[in-house]
Image: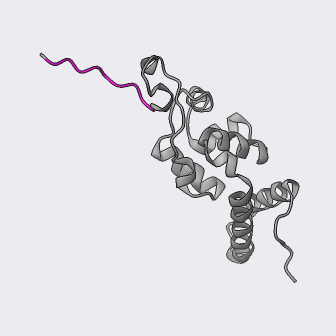
Amino acid sequence: MNKFKVIKSKEQYKEYTAKLIDLCEEPSDKYEDDRELLEVLIETWERENLKNEESDPVELIKFLMENHNLKREQMMKILEISKGTLSKILSYKKGLSKNIIRKLSEYFKISQETFNRPYPIVSAANKGHKDEGMMNTPKELQVVL
């Protein structure tokens, strides 16, 4: 009889994600089947229940931090970034780098594509541009002589 079942509630989702994190810290292959099963159950639940959060990677990160009970300090260590960089990401002032996307994907066991979606970046350099809400990086002005 399996000790894990299809996830049907947010509480069960939180319980299983915490269990998966614990099992991933175990160096033994003894729990490999449990880890794989939990990953499938968690991914299935997230795919069905995170539809709104998926449209915005920053909101998804905030949601995942809350559901995994992660503080900013813990997230900084996971992503290997500074407090300022994390703050800029969470306040839409800095986009996600490939490296950060990779680390998020590995830690939360969610596809990289989920974090690699366009979302609005707030930047003084983009202010007034017709597409300012969707620009990810400030552009240098090019002078043609």
Question: What residue is drawn where x is 52% and y is 51%?
Answer: 102
**x and y, in percent, of residue 78 in the image:** 62, 45
Residue 27, position in %: x, y? 67, 67
Please state if 100 lies on the left or on the right of 55 as rendered.
left
Q: Is residue 138 magenta?
A: yes
| Image position of 27 with respect to 137: above or below | below
Residue 73 drawn above or below residue 50 = above
Label the magenta part by its dominant secondary structure: loop
**Quadrant where the image shows the C terminus:** top left
Image quadrant containing the N terminus: bottom right
Give x and y (percent) for residue 127: 46, 17
Q: How is the image coloured?
A: one colour
Q: Position of residue 9 (x, y in %)?
A: 86, 58
Is 12 positioned to the left or the right of 20 in the image? right
| 110 vs 85: above or below | below
Q: Quadrant of residue 109?
A: bottom right
Q: Is residue 14 left or right of residue 37?
A: right
Magenta stretch: give its range: 136-144
Q: Residue lying furthest front in this view?
A: 130
Residue 25 in view: no
* Farthest left residue in view: 145
The residue lying toward the viewer, choosing from 102 and 83, is 102
Image point (49%, 22%), residue name: 123
Q: Is residue 80 magenta?
A: no
Q: Would residue 131 be seen by someone viewing this image from the given angle?
A: yes
- How many tags in the picture? 0
